[in-house]
Amino acid sequence: MNGDTIGAISTPPGSGGIGIIRVSGPDAILTVDGVFASGRHNRDNYRIRTAHDVVRMSAFTLKHGYIFDPATFPEGDPDGMPEFVDECLVSVMRAPKSYTGEDVVEINTHGGTAVMRRVLGILFRAGIRPAEPGEFTKRAFLNGRIDLTQAEAVADMIQARTEESRKAAMEQMSGALGELVNRHADMIGETLAKLEVAIDYPEYDEDEQIISEAMESLRTTGEALRELAATYEQGRIVREGLRVAISGRPNAGKSSLLNALLGFGRAIVTDIPGTTRDTLEEAMEISGYPVILTDTAGLRDADDPVEKIGVERAMKEASRADIVIYLMDAAGDFDEEITSLGNILPEISGKHIILAVNKCDLLSEGELDERKTRLEDFLKEKSAEISGNMCDAVGKIMYISVKNGGASEISERIRQYLDLHGAGSGGAILTGERHRELVARAIAAIDRAAVSASEKRPLDFIAYDVWECAQALGEITGRNVTDDVVDKIFSKFCLGK
Ligand SMILES: Nc1nc2c(ncn2[C@@H]2O[C@H](COP(=O)(O)OP(=O)(O)OP(=O)(O)O)[C@@H](O)[C@H]2O)c(=O)[nH]1
Ligand SMILES: [Mg+2]
């Protein structure tokens, strides 16, 4: 248990209907008691000093009253009243049944900057200290209320901007990931204990049997961890968002598409090729997932130095995207369009590509058919050199008109992609890079143990790798982590959480 009592504003900065100041620690109740007068006792100097309105509260109840500044009792006037700072509601949670596992008092004041700053100042003068970012949640972890994955999920929940991100955070906060990891950590722990016994008592000559049992158990854990590791890609989309770059030659209608997808005129659109020169990023939500859309400069051999940089950035953006929407201008010089497509294909071959021919409204049916044939013939010819993803896109070339609602067909494609690659039906998924690294470390240790076993190396070799696996798993849930790791995790939290 921590000896000191901490306090912070837990609601976001700025003005709001209410603001919550949270106080946690052994002196939480007494400290707030000393600066609070219940609505019944606020007119009576003697009652204010002696009623102990907060101390008398039962856990999980609310009391209405006033926060006063004890420094403002007038000197030399035994009947004098202190200054009332704000009208408020106070709630009490008693250890160990609270968020932190300690005594917690929350003061709901009006949500103004001056009010909350003043109340917090009064509490600091009364002896509590400012909480560090994430310190309430850190105490919940240190006091064993939650494991480390649950604590991290609290930060994810606060940051979640879309429905799927919220769901993933909720799943992890309820302990799904921690339970899965702990289950396997326990199994690994048992295996390790058996190996250690065998090492300590070599006279029982059962190594073969022990090793084969150990390998069986390691195999089970290895499979589960591999399955878990495979969810990271979904987890990354949930957490960081799906990156979608809009790419193509100047004037293809990229910025028009961005605007149409977003539903407002974010990017400048003109009929002058080379309008967009910088990359332009905007977040949106599709199917409950965060999607980061990027409009880019049209790809061409630019003379203008600024445009040149823009084209470089456009290429970079395409190469780091999950999905590249490649737009072609049906009404433009189609030979040029096809040549440019041929040039960019090798650069984006690993991506999921949505290939769309835009401005089809400008062509007659005959003209459009002619272009379709040219493009499809070109891609067939190229198909030997292009990757699976691209072949997939070739079969699904879109002929659209952004002017006439083509963006909704594109967002439907993105939706389909997310249905396939998104988080799906729940269960533990890996959203954090820290977790991914540790799972990979645990898998690597299991693989090494398997090699040692098959090469009939001494038991301690195997035991060392099993230990290493247990360490990695323990670091995920926080059963064994260094203070440095814990500090680093919680320092990323916001103040008051
Ligand atoms: N007829 C027609 N015009 C379109 C369509 N989509 C875009 N345009 C027009 O094409 C022109 C270029 O559109 P932009 O969205 O600026 O094209 P861009 O690809 O961003 O161009 P750069 O920024 O120069 O690379 C504008 O005049 C748009 O109004 C469409 O589907 N049909
Ligand atoms: Mg543009």
Image (cartoon, grey):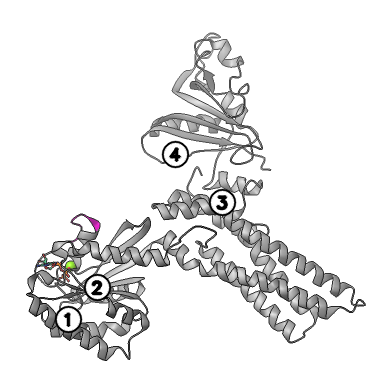
Q: Nearer the viewer, mark 1 or mark 2?
A: 1
Labelled disc at residue 114 = none
Label 2 environment density (alpha carbons within 10 Å; few <14, some 14–19, many ≥20): many
User: Which amino acid lies under the numbered mark 2 shown in the image of this protein?
Assistant: Ser
Question: What's the distance in space between the residues labelled 2 and 3, CA to CA?
Answer: 40 Å
Check disc 2 and report its element: helix, strand or loop: strand
Q: Is residue 266 magenta?
A: yes
Q: Is residue 187 above or below residue 91?
A: below
Q: Quadrant of the N terminus?
A: top right
CB contact under 8 Å: marks 3 and 1: no
- Front in this rendered view, residue 204 or 304: 204
- Front in this rendered view, residue 340 or 27: 340
Question: What's the distance in space between the residues labelled 4 and 2, CA to CA?
Answer: 41 Å
Question: What's the distance in space between the residues labelled 1 and 4, CA to CA?
Answer: 57 Å
Q: Earlier in the sequence, mark 1 or mark 4?
A: 4
Residue underneath mark 2: 247
Check disc 1 and report its element: helix, strand or loop: helix
- Front in this rendered view, residue 203 or 393: 393
User: Which amino acid lies under the numbered mark 1 shown in the image of this protein?
Assistant: Lys
Q: Earlier in the sequence, mark 4 or mark 2?
A: 4
Q: Report whether the residue tagged 3 is closer than 8 Å to ligand 2.
A: no
Tell whether 162 sits left or right of 44: left
